Image (tube, rainbow, N blue to C red):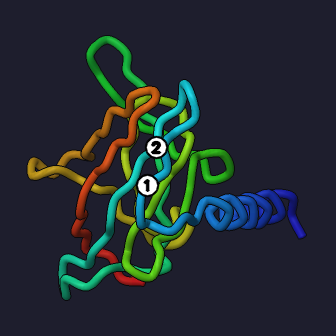
Amino acid sequence: MPIRKIIVIISILLSLVGCQKNVIPAKGFPTPESGKATVAGRLFSSTNKKALTGTVVRLAEVYRQNGEGAFLLDAAASPGTVTDQEGYFVFPNVDAKEYVLVVGDPMISYVIVSGSDGQAKVWKTESNKITNVGDIYVNYQQ
């Protein structure tokens, strides 16, 4: 098997393992550790308005330079989680930075959460605070 395929398979497995460890019941979002942030919200399908359960959600870090911005999703290292039975997701104890939400598996099918202007929506997290992104409706099929 070529080395490139092995690297992709390992990245996917690490991604899935990373997603599973952060599943937290949505009732009462956890207070972040000192110097960290928590990001929480709830996912819904924009087509049928039902909660998206068991759906992968990732945080892509935003980088800025000279007034321009870009975001990066690292399949192995970016924070990831899976929505619970009611569509809630929680990222406890992440670094306080700017993030874009990515719904789905970036290796197969995904949606970048965007604002009303069609651009990727950026959330700025703050140390020692919970950023509740609220209810998010996306056009995503599981």
Residue displayed at 34% across by 42% down: 131
User: Which residue is outermost to the top?
Assistant: 66
Q: Quadrant of the N terminus?
A: bottom right
Task: Please indicate whether residue 8 sits to the left or right of residue 126 in the image.
Answer: right
Query: Which numbered dot is residue 29?
Result: 1
Q: Are marks 2 and 1 in contact (CB under 8 Å)?
A: yes
Residue displayed at 58% across by 65% down: 23
Q: Decide which of tag 2 and tag 1 comes sooner along the chain.
A: 1
Q: Residues within 10 Å of mark 2 (few under 14, many from 20)?
A: many
Task: Please indicate whether residue 101 sits to the left or right of residue 105 in the image.
Answer: left
Q: Quarter-wise, where is residue 66 in the image?
A: top left
Q: Secondary structure at mark 2?
A: strand
Task: Please indicate whether residue 109 sits to the left or right of residue 67 in the image.
Answer: right
Residue displayed at 38% across by 41% down: 130
Q: Amino acid at mark 2?
A: Thr
Task: Please indicate whether residue 80 sits to the left or right of residue 114 in the image.
Answer: right
Q: Residues within 10 Å of mark 1 (few under 14, many from 20)?
A: many
Residue 17, relative to residue 70: is it above or below? Answer: below
Q: Amino acid at mark 1?
A: Phe
User: To which residue does mark 2 refer?
Assistant: 38
Q: Percent position (x, y) of residue 67?
A: 26, 16
User: Residues under labels 2 and 1: Cα distance?
Assistant: 8 Å
User: Which residue is outermost to the right?
Assistant: 1
Q: Percent position (x, y) of residue 97?
A: 44, 29
Q: Quarter-wise, where is residue 15 in the image?
A: bottom right
